[in-house]
Amino acid sequence: MIIISGNIDLDPQRMDAALKKAIPLIEGALDEPGCLDYDWCPNPMVAGRVRVFERWTDEASLASHFQSRWYRDMGALLVEAGMQGVDVLKYRTAISEPVYDESGTPRADFFTEK
């Protein structure tokens, strides 16, 4: 699994309109094979900052997304919205499991592999 997570800073005056315009692009990406999550949310602590979170099943799916109109059109929309900075990273994950164990206790350790 690949996780993409980070922030994109836009002109605060244009962010709300940009996120509204982004809805069909987000919906399009969510329909792509291998896309598990594709979330773009305003950060309430920093004006103009959009929090990005995506999950992809594999590299091939992510590579296909990078060639799609959804990705291309989102990039154009971000430029139109006065993109001022990008800090977005990708992570390859080897294991995932629930935060809470069977008793409802939150666990920082990876307890299902023991």
Image: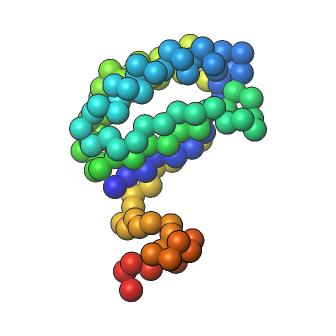
Looking at the image, the residue that sits furthest to the front is: 103
Colour option used: rainbow
Looking at the image, the residue that sits furthest to the bottom is: 114
- Give the image location of residue 17, x and y in percent: 60, 14
Tell me the quarter of the picture where residue 92 sits: bottom left
Q: Identify the residue at horizontal 65%, vertical 24% (top origin).
A: 10
Relative vertical location of residue 78 with respect to residue 54 in this rendering, above or below: above
User: In this rendering, would 60 be left or right of 113?
Assistant: left
Answer whether residue 85 is visible to the viewer in this image. Answer: no
Q: Identify the residue at horizontal 37%, vertical 52% (top origin).
A: 2
Tell me the quarter of the picture where residue 48 sits: top right
Q: Identify the residue at horizontal 50%, vertical 77% (top origin).
A: 103
**Quadrant (top left, top right, bottom left, bottom right) of the N terminus:** bottom left
User: In this rendering, would 67 be left or right of 11?
Assistant: left
Tell me the quarter of the picture where residue 71 sits: top left
Answer whether residue 87 is visible to the viewer in this image. Answer: yes
- Give the image location of residue 7, x and y in percent: 60, 39
Q: Identify the residue at horizontal 39%, vertical 86% (top origin).
A: 114
